[in-house]
Image (cartoon, helix red, strand yellow):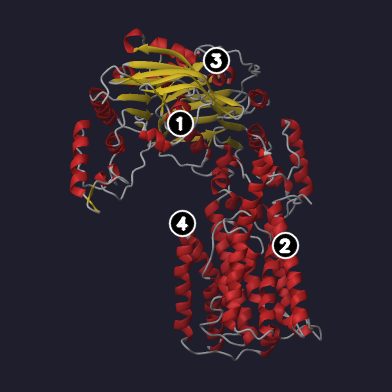
Amino acid sequence: MANKGDLLLEMKDVKKRFGGAVALRGTSLSVRAGEIHALLGENGAGKSTMLKILAGVHVHDGGEITLGGSAFISGSPQASIDQGIAVIYQEPSLFLDLSLAENVFVGRQPKKGIAIDWKEAEAQASKLFKELGVELDPKRQARGLSIADQQVVEIAKALSMNANIILMDEPTAALSASEVERLMTVMRNLRAANKAVIFVSHRLDEVFAISDHITVMRDGATVSEKKIAQTDLQTVIKEMVGRELTELFPKTDHPIGDVVLEVENLTNAAYFRNVSFTVRKGEIVALAGLVGSGRSEIARSIFGIDSYDEGSVKINHKPLKKNSPIAAMDVKIALVPEDRRQQGLFMVAGVNRNISMESFSRLTGRFFINFKKERALTNEWRENLSIKYADQSDPVDRLSGGNQQKTVLAKWLATNPDLLIVDEPTRGIDVGTKAEVHRLIDKAAGEGKAVLMISSELPEVLGMADRIIVMREGRQVTELSRKEATQENVIAAATTGKKGI
Amino acid sequence: MPEKNKFKLRKSWDTAILALLFVVWVLASMTTDNFLSSINVSQIFSNSSEIMIMGFAMVFLIIAGEIDLSIASILALSSAMLGYSYAHGAPIWLAILIAMAVGTTCGFINGFLVTKLGLGSLAVTIGALALYRGIANGILGTNTINEFPEFWTNFGFDTIGKSFIPQTLPVIIVFGIFFGLLLHNTPFGRRTLAIGQSQMAARFAGVNVVRHKIIIFTFTGFMSGVAGIIYTFRFSTAQADNGVGLELLVISACLLGGVSIFGGIGTMWGVVAGVMLASSVESWLTLREINAQWRTIVTGILLLISVAAPVLVDKWKRAKATAANKS
């Protein structure tokens, strides 16, 4: 048992690359017993990579990690568990048909002779729940338990395995306000039991309500590590976004024309409420906010992949039928979805087949697809977007991420849309291709298309958008013009829901 | 052709089946006296009529990631309705139309249950397999109807003029060309492949997945009805147990022909080669007087090979690629 204040975990100059991409360029973190330590940073700052290294999922390439003085054995989830590290994920993975006691002791059931001693298991589970301050019935099934209570069971399981470092990856993201309160109680009880709690969160208000220490990461490096008393909300936000806007964005000014898209009071109770905005010809409007703030769901509702409960969508002043991608395509809406591999492309099909998918009306005579025209179309877009591939019937699987993204763009630009919706258009592609994609989006706006862009990358949002709508937890927090928007006020709105700081 | 380099593995699989078909023919003609005799070749074509006809449609279902196990029962129900309505005084053309309508309706019901209720096609069509066969039993019981107009029974049995070409073959060829073009040269075919490759991406591409699948199920039912009609005339028999077990032969022929059981991949000529291979092997074994049980066992083995081989070849290629990358 650790004493309060003992150094439990120390990471020094830890590095990690994935192929050519640097995820961690030298991060440090030290966590002590009896401490709640918040790990903050924008999407892509490297928090998840850190957690995954500690969880044994990834192996770090450089730097030192020590646990209570001895070197950390990396690379195996079981080894991490044996060393007292437990990870609680956002979505708990309990066996829903088993009892809570069974879930806590799964695989390590206490035994009496050769039989499992259920009484003992239940008594121990019950004791753990009590220590955590949440009295759950160890005999009940896990099915039907709220997410928060499922997390409690996971934590109990971790404690039963003598974990003393508990990592929580956005534990509150899926919780309601009262559940968050409950989880905080559990976290405080863990602190009182001299455990170290490391948690990742994007809700800065909660972070300030509960943590003792805050470590801020940016672009794979630790920016600051401070006691809560030594910092404040404004400082933390500055540290999170402190990136210089040096990347080149080729945004040019275009004449802005008539309204193309009008969204009014759009509500899908599960994801977003009362969302209203417009996008005009030649204008790029960005939906900014954190992952999970309802932005992609709004795009899906406009395009008709999902339905919505209330509100309306108008295109060129005419109401658009809900839940019908075909109707959306008829009025020339294009959606480049966030997940190109799952949603945007047919990975085993050729580049040509992917690009021609939405343009059959132009390629088909009376009945049949004209293969010559299909080739010509593919070549045309290969040139327009400089897509690189060996043969146009190569499966897109073989293309690089950047060329895959260009293929999705090509497939939709080939439909000559009036409204182009792009969801995370540059996720996971290299810097050079990013700039190209930005140029293409800007060009589309220049041609008079209305562009709705969803992006989690602040520089991209600030560099590309004429107007920025900031979303938080399904609600529109504020709308900023290109002039008004700064990294600080966008991230403050996205993380705290307040318009100004 | 733009398809040139598409799915190299699968293409080579198609080619391999064609080569295998050739090997079977050579071996069969060497080990039997009259495998390549005009009568036997005619028999091979004739015996594969129903499998071919149902295979043309089934390939769409498998490519779209679904399956229909009830096709042989639909065949029987159409056959039963054909016999029943003709025996009860309907003119033959009407009886034929009724049989087609019954098949189409059965297919539509399957499609509706699978898509609108979101039930798995395996579960739904196993139920339908029992249901449609049961209805056929209810209609005909153990009765057999074998009085049909001579023109039609000749159509089912005879060859064209003095040639060895069965009269049913032109019908099959027309269907084959129609469905082959539908699969490979039309937006409908592309969308079918797209659904099988990624249903989610298909939705994001604006494909109405539900409607598309219902259409495929429906024409699979229609083609099973047509197969029922041909079966009835070929044997001059309408009875409730017509075509028992044919669904497995159809599915195995498709898989033999390189259609992926996971969907998204398949060609029409592969299916044709698969059907020809299956019925050639069957004919060879029959000529060698190998009994029916053994023939079933061989069919089973072919089916397993056709499912396992692409996966194994793929694994082997990956292993080779990894080894090459390391060195």
Query: Which subunit holds the residue at mark 4?
Result: B
Question: Which type of secondary structure does the marked residue at label 2 adopt?
Answer: helix
Q: Nearer the viewer, mark 1 or mark 4?
A: 1
For the residues beneath circles 2 and 1, the answer to whether they share a chain is no
Distance in Å between CA atoms under marks 2 and 1: 47 Å
Residue occupying the far right of the picture: B162
Q: Give the amino acid at mark 4.
A: Lys
Query: Which subunit holds the residue at mark 3?
Result: A
Q: What is the number of callouts on the image?
A: 4
Are the two marked residues, 4 and 3, in contact with CB atoms closer than 8 angstroms? no
Q: Where is residue A427 in the image (x, y as percent from the top left)?
A: 57, 29
Q: Nearer the viewer, mark 3 or mark 2?
A: 2
Identify the mark nearer the N-term, 2 or 4: 2
- Residue identified by numbered label 3: A482
In the displayed structure, B59 sits above or below A342; it is below
Distance in Å between CA atoms under marks 1 and 4: 49 Å
Query: Which subunit holds the residue at mark 1?
Result: A
Left or right of B60, for residue A320: left
Residue A358 visible, this angle: no
Quadrant for residue B64, please give it.
bottom right
Distance in Å between CA atoms under marks 3 and 2: 61 Å
Question: Of the numbered discs in the image, which one, if any, rests on residue B16?
Answer: 2
Q: Give the amino acid at mark 3.
A: Arg
Q: Give the amino acid at mark 2.
A: Ala
- Residue identified by numbered label 1: A74
Label 2 Cα crowd, 10 Å radius (few <14 / some 14-19 / many 20+): some
- Residue identified by numbered label 4: B116
Distance in Å between CA atoms under marks 2 and 4: 39 Å
